[in-house]
Image (tube, rainbow, N blue to C red):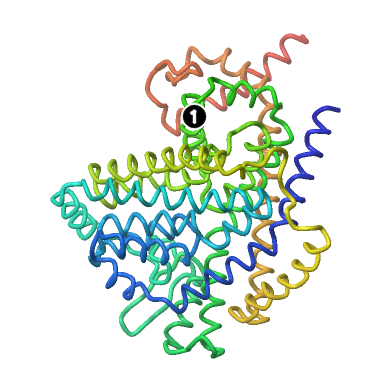
Amino acid sequence: MDVLASLARAVSLVVEMTWQTWWALVLGFTVSGAVHAFVSEERMSETLGDDGWREVSLATLFGAASSSCSYSAVATTKTVFSKGASLAASLAFMFASTDLVVELGLVMWVLLGWEFVVGEFLGGLVAVAVVTLVARHVPSRWVEDARDHLAENREATCPSCGMSVDPTGAGPDELLETPGGTEYFCGAGCLESYRASVENPSGGLLTLAGWKRAASSTVGDWEMLWSDIALGFVLAGVVGGFVPTEWWTALFGAGSGVEGVVYTVALAVALGALSFMCSVGNIPFALVLWQNGLPFGGVLSFVYADLLIPPLLRIYRRSYGTLMGGVIVVTLALAAVVAGVVVHYVAIGVGIVPTGAVGGTVDHGYTLVLNGVFTPVFLGQLVLVYGVDGLRDRLWGTYERTRDAVLGTHATVATVRSTRSLAPVGAVARRRVGSRLPGRVGRDGSDAGDEPSRESDDGASSDSTAEVSCDSGCDSA
């Protein structure tokens, strides 16, 4: 019964958080898509060539107005860095584009409250300052070596979002023939965004063509992030429903004073890195951690750690080289810890740390109205990008893939069960004819000899059948 109660609570948490944040996600992605459609990477690269505070401030603003996908942020950062942006401005852009974006702030406001939004913004500025100061002391030779390494190891990338793509595995909705050759995309949303920008390159803010480009960018962001967001909600629900409060108390209750805060903030950074989630997907889990005793600054540092998940660490090393990749990781980790500790004490000093459980900032009546307003906006964006027929085909294709996956899983389970039912027969066969079979690798991993040929297997199978039949027949005789 306890398991069923925990499961019910987990499902309830997932549904409640999804309902509360749906409108905020749609609004945030819409704003992000519009900015992406009307601000070019070339313009950013031209203004971020120095490591002064002006360039860093502009990089932070560009990042805060961009997509919240960590992978897309890393890809865009590689592009602007390769085109001449300074290391400080590039890292400031990358941090801001994941942790200071509109959609993250909206979801944080809904789930955690305005106090955390203020803390996130202040902590983001502290983190950007730390990143800038560290980047200024990185030897210029290291920076140029990283830029050369990036140029020498250039990969096929999506021309829309800049993420790495595998041309050999591209489907029909992930490639486009152009006069300059074949372009490969990370998803259909990015393909449509690119096609809209090519067909309507001059569409302004007040034109239908411009907003079609914006809708395409928004849908591309959804395609990149929906799995992370869904995983975040499910993981938060499972943790909130099944992990006992005592466990969190033991984890977060070690030490007190400054040492205790530093410990919990550093622990939060480690948890954020190990969550494998990025940006908005971390917020539901952050709510669970806050409700179970993680300090104010620790919650913020947990969110800041979305750029330290293992897949991104591999990208840093592969793109910039081992040395600069290590510098980036240490810099981001240090910035997350320092920002969390500083803002924790600033928030206490000004009295904005919430004293109880948070969440549900928007009244349920307003949530219903907002979801009712923004759901048609979301559907309209899909229709604008794919068309009615295209959207219907995609939904049907998703249904067929899901059905095939479920049926395939069912068939696999049935096969495993039937195999297990024959286990006693196999054991008898191995015991009866083991002395005549060529050696194999045993279950314990020991080397039992060379692998037999197919002919030997066939012969052994015949002998096994004969011995099993004799075993049952002779015993009865």
Residue underneath mark 1: 457
Position of residue 367 measured from the top left corner of the image (x, y, whole percent): 77, 62
Rendered location of residue 188, percent (x, y): 52, 70
- Whether 332 is drawn above or below 373: the answer is above
Rendering quarter of residue 366: bottom right
Which quarter of the rendering shows the N terminus? top right
Q: Position of residue 217 (x, y in %)?
A: 51, 73
Q: Along the line of sight, which residue is nearer the eye, 318 or 289?
A: 289
| Figure quadrant of the C terminus | top right
Left-right relation of 341 to 335: right
- Which element carries disc 1, helix, strand or loop? helix
Residue at 36% in and 75% down? 182
Q: Name the residue at 34% across, 54% down.
A: 91
In this view, 166 is above or below 281: below
- At label 1, counting other C-alpha atoms closer than 10 Å, the crowd grade (few under 14, some 14-19, many 20 or more) is some
Amino acid at dot 1: Asp
Q: Which residue is at the far left?
A: 141
Horizontal and vertical percent for residue 464?
Answer: 59, 22
